[in-house]
Image: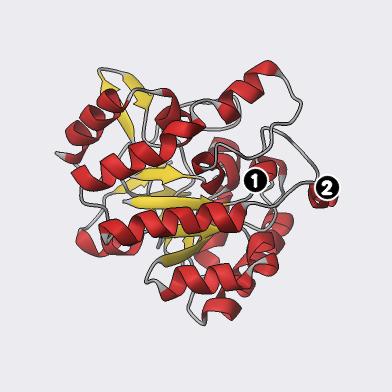
Amino acid sequence: MFTVDVEDWYQTNDFNIPPNQWGDYESRVESSTRAILELLDRHNVKATFFVLGCVAERSPELVKEICAKGHEIGSHGGWHRMLTGMDRDTFRKDLLYSKNLLEGITQKECRMFRAPSWSIAASNRWVLEILEEEGFVCDSSIQPFKTPLSGMSKVPTRPFHPVIGGRKLNIIEFPSTVFEIGPLRIPFSGGFYLRFMPYGIIKRAFKKVSLKKHAMLYVHPWETDPLHPVIKGALHIKFIHYTNLNTTMQKLDKLLGSFNFITLEEAIRDKEYPEIKI
């Protein structure tokens, strides 16, 4: 599966720039997203694009272009806020802001969701219940390993139907893809991990994982744009954000030429998934 989180470079949670200051920064999301669209066109691959509501509101023609090319549109939330800091009402408002915008632009039902920064954890698994209530059939917001921001180390590494409070949700969870060595779960399939690791290791990991299940790649448009501005920040944040930006497009091109990628909708139709208590 090939997935794209459509957000601008300054909207990442690492920088923690408040939305009322976003206008001070150069927007590059349209050009960098179109670079990914051109790459997918060359390989005749359809992908799932998770679009921020605020990006859709500012750039509706970009959303229409993604949709017109046959790609799937999902929600990435409204303003790229961490879900771990929201209550139920705040999350629902943020979700519906993006869902209603995207459906108005595409004239199609928005049924896929990915949380900003994969921010579903054990403490806010209720997010999945709200997604189900609002008509979503697929979520891809859980990392099956712990991070400083979120993650759930006990969830399966394969897609599953979440069971919460003894009830199976009518939604399928697609966790981020990891490479497993014994008890270790090693991320490699997107974001910083894709940029940091050598291509040879990434290719071998994709090949190994793909033998047993659908592997899922994820990328942000700004990761394909090595010329986007550098701003002040802590060294470790700058390292995570700016490392190897000049290698992303080459790695994506090679992966697209080596593996078959599909959308999340296609993966849902492909097989039945187990029920797992979380």
| Image point (65%, 24%), residue name | 237
Q: Residue furthest front?
A: 227
The numbered disc on residue 83 is: 1
Q: Are marks 2 and 1 in contact (CB under 8 Å)?
A: no
Q: Which residue is mark 2?
A: 24
Q: Nearer the viewer, residue 39 or 265?
A: 39
Q: Is residue 176 visible?
A: no
Residue 183, position as x, y percentages in the image:
30, 18
Residue in the picture at 72% in, 19% down: 234
Packing grade of label 1 (10 A; few <14, some 14-19, many >=20) is many
Q: Position of residue 26 (x, y in %)?
A: 73, 49
Q: Earlier in the sequence, mark 2 or mark 1?
A: 2
Residue neighbourhood size for the residue with mark 2, other residues' Cα within 10 Å, grouped as few (<14), some (14–19), many (≥20): few
Q: Secondary structure at mark 1?
A: helix
Label 1 amino acid? Leu
Classify residue 13 by image quadrant.
top right
Q: Quadrant of residue 201?
A: top left
Q: Position of residue 110 (x, y in %)?
A: 50, 70
Using residue 32 as the reference point, say whether residue 97 is left or right of it: right
Residue 2: x and y in percent read: 35, 51
Q: Residue at x 56, y 32 (%)?
A: 150
Whether residue 101 can be seen here? yes
Report the side of 119 relative to 17 (left or right).
left
Side (left or right) of 89 relative to 245:
right
Q: Nearer the viewer, mark 2 or mark 1?
A: 2
Give the residue type that dot 2 points to: Asp
Rounded to the nearest whole Å, what is the CA distance between mark 2 and mark 1? 25 Å
